[in-house]
Amino acid sequence: MSGLRVLAPGPGPPVLPLDRLAREAVQGSRTAMRGKRPELVDTAVRSALRQTIFRFELVMKINVAAKELLDREELIAALLASQVAMLLHEPADREVSGDSHLCRLGLCRRLALGRVDERLRREMLAAALRPATSTATRPSSRRWPPPSRHS
């Protein structure tokens, strides 16, 4: 667990990030509620701790999901690259039919384009869910899927 430890400012033992966040949340809520009744202070402290732990766990889950998505993307890219490399570097002495090559290249093409489509849809969904701060940051100029030319 030593890899998760962060050195606290000043002398003293290292402190885990969640411990430090919880301590700061308690201290901040006590400071904000200075002079109030003890019941109100305790309620504010519990609420601050709950919010801090929720946000910490949310950030950790987002990090894990992002890492898993990047790992998946890396594996898919490696798979597609290896398929293309195998198609391009078939041994000369091996008898390979042209149809087999065309089928495999077509499959690689469909997989690659499918990945691009999926990624664009994901980006568009993320952009739609993001709060609009200005019209300049919104990707309104891109539409996916593109409109049909015959409609």
Image (cartoon, rainbow, N blue to C red):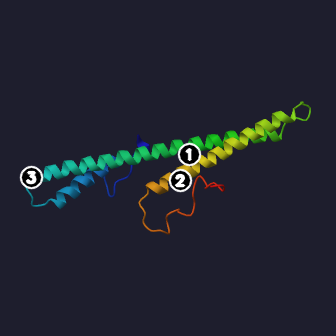
**Does 56 sit above or below residue 138?**
above
Q: Nearer the viewer, mark 3 or mark 1?
A: 1
Mark 2 packing: few (<14 Cα in 10 Å), some, or many (20+)? Answer: few
Which badge, 3 or 1, is on the more N-terminal residue?
Answer: 3
Residue placed most toward the observer, 68 or 130: 130
Badge 3 amino acid: Pro
Give the image location of residue 109, x and y in percent. Answer: 72, 44
Question: Residue at (53%, 49%) from the top-left corner?
Answer: 122
| Residue 123 image label | 2
Task: Give the quadrant of residue 77.
Answer: top right
Q: Is residue 100 left or right of residue 118?
A: right
Give the image location of residue 97, x and y in percent. Answer: 87, 32
Task: Give the quadrant of residue 85.
Answer: top right
Question: Residue at (31%, 46%) from the top-left corner?
Answer: 54
| Residue 18 image label | none
Q: Nearer the viewer, mark 2 or mark 3?
A: 2
Cα gap from disc 3 to disc 1, whole angstroms: 48 Å
Task: Give the quadrant of residue 84.
Answer: top right
Q: Is residue 138 left or right of residue 106?
A: left
Give the image location of residue 80, x and y in percent. Answer: 70, 41
Q: Is residue 71 left or right of residue 112?
A: left
* Quadrant (top left, top right, bottom left, bottom right) of the C terminus: bottom right
| Residue situated furthest front in the rendering | 151
Residue placed most toward the observer, 109 or 58: 109
Question: Residue at (72%, 41%) from the top-left corner?
Answer: 108
Is there any visible trace of residue 67 in the rendered image? Answer: yes
What residue is disc 1 on? 70
Residue placed most toward the observer, 115 or 49: 115
